[in-house]
Amino acid sequence: MMTDAEENLEMIIAGIAAVLGACALYCMSLLFRRPRPSHPIALTGQLFPTGFLWGTGEDAYQHEGGNDHADWYAWERTEPHPFADGSFADRCVDFWNRYEDDFARAAADGQNFHRIGIEWSRVEPAPGIYDESAFGHYRLMLESLKAKGMTVAVNLWHFTLPAWAAAAGAWENPQTMERWEAYVAECGRRFGDMVDYWSTMIDAQIYVLRGYFTGEIPPLKHDPATGVRILGTLAHAHARAYHILRPYGGPVGMIYFFSLCQSAGNPLDGFVAGQFDRLFNWNLTDALRTGRLRVAIAGGPKLDQSLPEAAGTLDWLGVNYYYREIIRFNPRAQGLVDRGPAPGAALTDLGWEIYPEGMYRLCKSLERRYPGVPLMITENGIADRNDEKRPRFILDHLAWLHRLLAEGCPLLGYSYWAGTDNLEWLDGFVPKFGLYRVDLQTMERNETASARLYRFIATNNRLPHESELAGILDPPSPNG
């Protein structure tokens, strides 16, 4: 018979064992939740559906050059210089003057889809004053694309604003919304017969996060509370554009940068990962389905805004997917969040993780979250100056995309970013995303091995077999 002391000791030992067992189970669960690399899919000549869209595209400010009416043009001339390489967007890659050659090259490469942007500041350099020659130039671009048999997408806003709108308070000024509606109506009236897919805006949440939370881009503010309100303003701007454009035909949607967010493992990591995932990926796009914008940042601003005019305003959704981010809790970091690649992962020149499986996982989430909304991979690309990783990057992502199609995901097509090198916002011209390298002195376009690979895929509507790769990637012999 045990004494009371012995019973107490036995209970203590049992308690310690239970705690240790729970700790062991928790540690094992962390191992299973640890981010894993993307699973490879073999190349077997996967065939894509008839009519699948293969394309590239340009963003207005990032490619055109020759526009001194945007707020970014003036900002580039401030000190310290905002771009990593000290460059300017003056000529950019001269797409404004070289669009015909770039379109002809895309068509010769087997592409049947192309996206361009309209630069608001170029067509409305002063409030209510429209530049007819600029509108006419865009019309020529669209006519050129249609003459080449292209399915055409047009985007109306991406970060930059007319200098006059920025000076008057940007999206914080209600008059900006009035001018936006008039600008959208002008685009609809002038281009509606040429556009197959309208996008109202690109990466709206990044404009808010980098313009109002971190203050990295115009309007250069550190004011998250105002930023959250501007997120509501942009949802309303999308809704107004949707209802203006809808009568001109062509589905209307939005192009959105999605990141696959995964927790590093522990409960605090999971908490901040959930917060960031909702703010970056879902708050705005959910509002365009439900008509209600809900933002709740722990210890930060909150918003619960009814937007009935925004409900059901996604006829299609453009998906920009580049990388996975591992989210960690850090009490010393802004927003308590550290974001970065998985340890040991393959990286792009910008340090972004190469995670092709993320495209599959993200699109499966979108399919469940927004049933019935067609998806289009509008941007997927890699900063790779030497074109060493790009071929496998393209192939691995497309292999996962093919699996999505085989499982019935409503994917319209795939557009690689980008056809040529371009201005990559704060990173200037340092990152090289293009299938064609651009000599910034001569503006000459130079083919890469990846361009030859993408030509094979688009022309044949299939992926190559592994045994075909060397013959595709090797440059043609001088003797043909």
Image (cartoon, grey):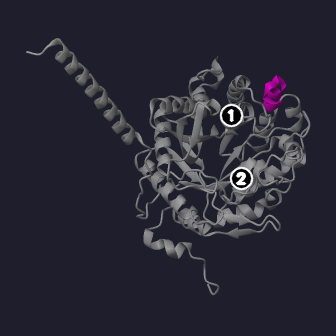
Kindly report the secondary structure that dominates the magenta region of the rendered protein. Answer: helix
Residue 479 place in picture, x, y as percent = 63, 87
Of badges 2 and 1, the one in the foreground is: 1
Toward the viewer: 315 or 19?
19
Q: Note whether 394 is above or below 234 in the view shown.
A: below
The reply to whether the C-beta atoms of the residues labelled 2 and 1 are less than 8 Å apart is no
For label 1, count other residues whose C-alpha is less than 10 Å away and answer few (under 14), some (14-19) or many (20+): many
Residue 238 place in picture, x, y as percent = 69, 31
- What span is in magenta? 170-181
Tell me where residue 241 sits by quadrant. Answer: top right
Q: Which mark is residue 58?
A: 2
What residue sits right under mark 1 in the picture? 209
Q: Secondary structure at mark 2?
A: loop
127 is within the stretch colored magenta: no
Amino acid at the residue labelled 2: Glu
How many marks are shown on the rendered structure? Answer: 2
Amino acid at the residue labelled 1: Leu
For label 2, count other residues whose C-alpha is less than 10 Å away and answer few (under 14), some (14-19) or many (20+): many
Q: Residue furthest bottom?
A: 479
Q: Note whether 372 is above or below 468 in the view shown.
A: above
Q: Residue furthest left?
A: 1
